[in-house]
Image (tube, rainbow, N blue to C red):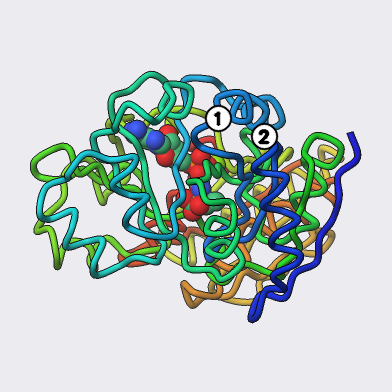
Amino acid sequence: MMTKILKINPISPEPSKIKEAAEVINRGGTVAFPTETVYGLGADALNPEAIRKVFKAKGRPPDNPLIVHISDMDTFQLVAKKPVKAAIDLINRFWPGPLTIIVKKKKIVPGIVTGGLDTVAVRMPDNKIALSLIKMAGVPLVAPSANLSGKPSPTRSRDVAADLSGKIDVIIDGGKTRIGIESTVIDMTTSPPTLLRPGGLPVEEIEKVTGPLQGFLASHESKPATSPGMKYRHYAPKARMVIIVGDSDAVQSDIMKLAEKGLKDGEKVGILAFHKEFRVKGCITKYAGSRPGTVAGRLFDILREFDKDGVDLIISEPYGGSGLKLGIADRLRRAAGLK
Ligand code: TXA
Ligand code: MG
């Protein structure tokens, strides 16, 4: 299949182009579009045939449910049963924005969206192209991240094209996404609510509204796989990846040692640095910045660049903490296969 690239102005989306993309959705097609977090692969959330195409294009396991994207609260009521008050409070405070909530689903949502669960994930993205596309299509859209299953999520249209060109109908090019990691996912059907995936909205902001969340240990050492998607290897570059932990001197010397060993074994070695411009002779160093907003914006990009460079081994400095850093640390650990 030929994939059409549609360049759309992110500040003031051209209605004729949005209409063209919406018509593809309404015909049961697939359209990748930007959100404020990452690019999503959109299809009509009420059309099982269209959704099947999304799973197929991504190579996504059928038991990993999709997020339903909406542009107004009438559509929320169409897909979701009335949630608890704390969920309404979150919606009022953070939508549109990088927050996904899990609520009880209504019958209209096909089982293929939710992997057979009686709950549905819903979010209202904070991106003009996304919102006008959903509105124009007149239906909610499923939109998993627009990458091949297991790969880092795309933050630009060219990343989407690299993974999905020839497999989907349209890619909207709406520039680089603002945040760069996916939404925070909270299950509002449990009491207290459960953090399923840290992400673009800091957990601390959510807890100000809901009180303490359960489920995701801040220590990151172990945690229950409550969200079906979290059990899969994810965000992974082709290279082996290792995160070095410890105090900064130990980290520096361990990175050196591991890099030298890799080089000696004839490997192409990449170093992912956060805290300083860190160089080891013969290695490709990429600097993700240190401020969380900068790191979130660059992380997936850098992982994809390492792949393009044909790196065999990525050695990463440690990164973590609270707020947005929690989501970044999670993606980093998953990219390293939890090593
Ligand atoms: O920022 C985002 O959320 C992006 C943009 C495109 O909106 N989308 C995204 O979708 O990251 P996806 O499909 O890559 O991740 C959805 C996550 C998965 O971990 C999935 O298992 C979980 O949400 N999820 C979806 N429905 C669920 C449900 N009913 N119960 C528990 N987890 C659910
Ligand atoms: Mg994904």
Q: Which residue does the image show at 30% across and 67% down from the upper left?
A: 94
Task: Using the image, determine if residue 50 lies above or below residue 146.
Answer: above
Q: Position of residue 161 (x, y in %)?
A: 81, 49
Q: Position of residue 206 (x, y in %)?
A: 22, 62
Do labels 1 and 2 touch, CB within 8 Å?
yes
162 sits left or right of 304 in the view: right
Q: Which residue does the image show at 37% across and 50% down from the upper left?
A: 75
Amino acid at circle 1 = Asn
Q: Nearer the viewer, residue 246 or 172?
A: 172
Q: Quadrant of ligand 1?
A: top left
Q: Nearer the viewer, residue 339 or 260?
A: 339
- The residue under label 2 is 28
Q: Residues within 10 Å of mark 1 (few under 14, many from 20)?
A: many
- The residue under label 1 is 47
Label 2 CB-ligand 1 distance < 8 A? no
Label 1 CB-ligand 1 distance < 8 A? no
Task: Using the image, determine if residue 96 lies above or below residue 77.
Answer: below
Q: Nearer the viewer, residue 149 or 109?
A: 109
Amino acid at circle 2 = Gly
